[in-house]
């Protein structure tokens, strides 16, 4: 594969038009950061001639740009805002970054509510549980999760810790289906159940299916995968119990439904389905909180695209003052 080479001299005409279009909506008044300067700083920091000073400059400008994007929202000062923007899988280091951001909250702001903008495809249930519990314990009585686009599997588990989950037309949660070696835990269980049904229908094929299973599945895996699903259910129930008074159903029923009711790992739990699961006191639709999350998402998604052109993966985890993390991709 030919290595992708992108630097400040290689921005196409279309990219320049994108910068100009965004800049038109962000004119440099009262010392505001403009889009073009943030993009240039990113390219300087992560292009062919990158250096630490340029990377730090990009981080500082992006932080200012994020904060000025939401400063006009009427309720922004009611919350300490955290972000978990990670298009890969949630891991232990994510909980470390969230913990660092929470411990860095200034003393005069510790009486504020906590708002987490969440974008994740899933990951480790244990990490999701820790982040959810940490946010809840640090929320001064109200923890809000905003899902501007998707919070799947373990990210849905994290969201069960919230008093409120704010969603929009494109928001989606998903079944809590732990991934083990990149395989959905319940996928194995469902496959075995399907094979058992086929054997019942065709008893003469039992030997063939038994041979197939012996060649493809370690017997110890069956119990391990089921235990992983059960652990996810227990995590969800514990988090839901922390605010059970506002839920539309019993925590145990919600947890069971999220883990076992949906047969497809990618099933879309949209805002309407989420209301049916959690109730109207938990799921909030198109709110000022959602507007904050959607604005931050749009900006970070845009810079994720720039990072992709620079052959980097992009993550933003922490507060609006935190540094983004960009990791250069290996070229095979």
Image (cartoon, rainbow, N blue to C red):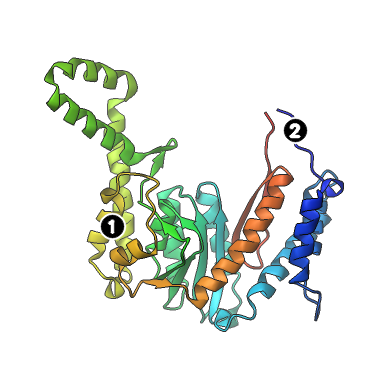
Identify the mark at residue 272; answer none if there is no mark: none
Residue 60 position, x and y percent, is: 75, 65
In the displayed structure, would residue 107 be above or below residue 135? below
Label 2 sits on a secondary structure element that is loop
Residue 140 position, x and y percent, is: 45, 78
Q: Distance between the residues labelled 1 and 2?
A: 46 Å
Query: Split into 4 quadrants, where in the image is the N terminus?
Result: top right
Residue 268 seen in this snapshot: yes
Residue 53 position, x and y percent, is: 83, 56
In the displayed structure, would residue 289 be above or below residue 222? below
The reply, left or right, for residue 23 in relation to residue 179 is right
Label 1 sits on a secondary structure element that is helix
Quadrant assignment, res 238: bottom left
Question: Dot 2: within a 10 Å radius of its alpha carbon, few (fewer than 14), some, or many (20 or more) residues?
Answer: few
Mark 2 lies on residue? 3
Query: Split into 4 quadrants, where in the image is the C terminus?
Result: top right
Total residue callouts: 2
- The mark closer to the camera, 1 or 2, is 2
Q: Residue at x 27, y 22 (%)?
A: 213
First in sequence: mark 1 or mark 2? 2
Residue 17 position, x and y percent, is: 78, 58
Q: Which residue is drawn at 27% across and 75% down?
A: 245
Residue 35 seen in this snapshot: no
Mark 1 lies on residue? 255
Quadrant assignment, res 311: top right
The reply, left or right, for residue 235 in relation to residue 127 is left
Question: Dot 1: within a 10 Å radius of its alpha carbon, few (fewer than 14), some, or many (20 or more) residues?
Answer: many
């Amino acid at each position: 594969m030919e290595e992708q080479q992108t630097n400040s001299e290689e921005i196409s005409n279309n990219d320049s038009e994108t910068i100009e279009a965004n800049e038109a909506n962000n004119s440099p008044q009262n010392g505001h950061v403009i889009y073009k300067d943030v993009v240039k700083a990113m390219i300087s920091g992560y292009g062919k001639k990158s250096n630490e000073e340029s990377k730090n400059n990009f981080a500082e400008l992006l932080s200012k740009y994020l904060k000025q994007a939401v400063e006009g929202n009427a309720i922004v000062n009611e919350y300490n805002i955290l972000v978990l923007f990670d298009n890969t899988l949630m891991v232990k280091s994510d909980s470390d970054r969230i913990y660092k951001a929470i411990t860095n909250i200034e003393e005069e702001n510790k009486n504020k509510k906590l708002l987490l903008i969440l974008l994740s495809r899933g990951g480790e249930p244990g990490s999701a549980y820790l982040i959810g519990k940490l946010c809840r314990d640090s929320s001064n009585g109200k923890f809000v999760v905003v899902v501007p686009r998707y919070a799947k599997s373990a990210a849905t588990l994290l969201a069960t810790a919230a008093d409120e989950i704010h969603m929009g037309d494109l928001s989606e949660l998903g079944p809590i289906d732990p991934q083990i070696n990149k395989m959905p835990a319940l996928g194995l269980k469902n496959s075995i159940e399907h094979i058992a049904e086929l054997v019942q229908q065709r008893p003469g094929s039992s030997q063939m299916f038994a041979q197939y299973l012996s060649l493809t599945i370690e017997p110890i895996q069956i119990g391990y995968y089921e235990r992983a699903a059960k652990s996810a259910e227990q995590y969800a129930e514990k988090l839901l119990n922390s605010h059970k008074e506002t839920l539309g159903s019993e925590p145990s029923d919600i947890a069971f439904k999220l883990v076992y009711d949906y047969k497809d790992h990618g099933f879309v739990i949209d805002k309407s389905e989420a209301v049916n699961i959690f109730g109207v006191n938990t799921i909030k639709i198109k709110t000022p909180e959602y507007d904050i999350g959607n604005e931050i998402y749009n900006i970070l998604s845009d810079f994720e695209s720039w990072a992709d052109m620079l052959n980097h993966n992009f993550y933003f985890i922490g507060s609006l003052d935190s540094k983004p993390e960009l990791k250069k991709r290996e070229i095979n």
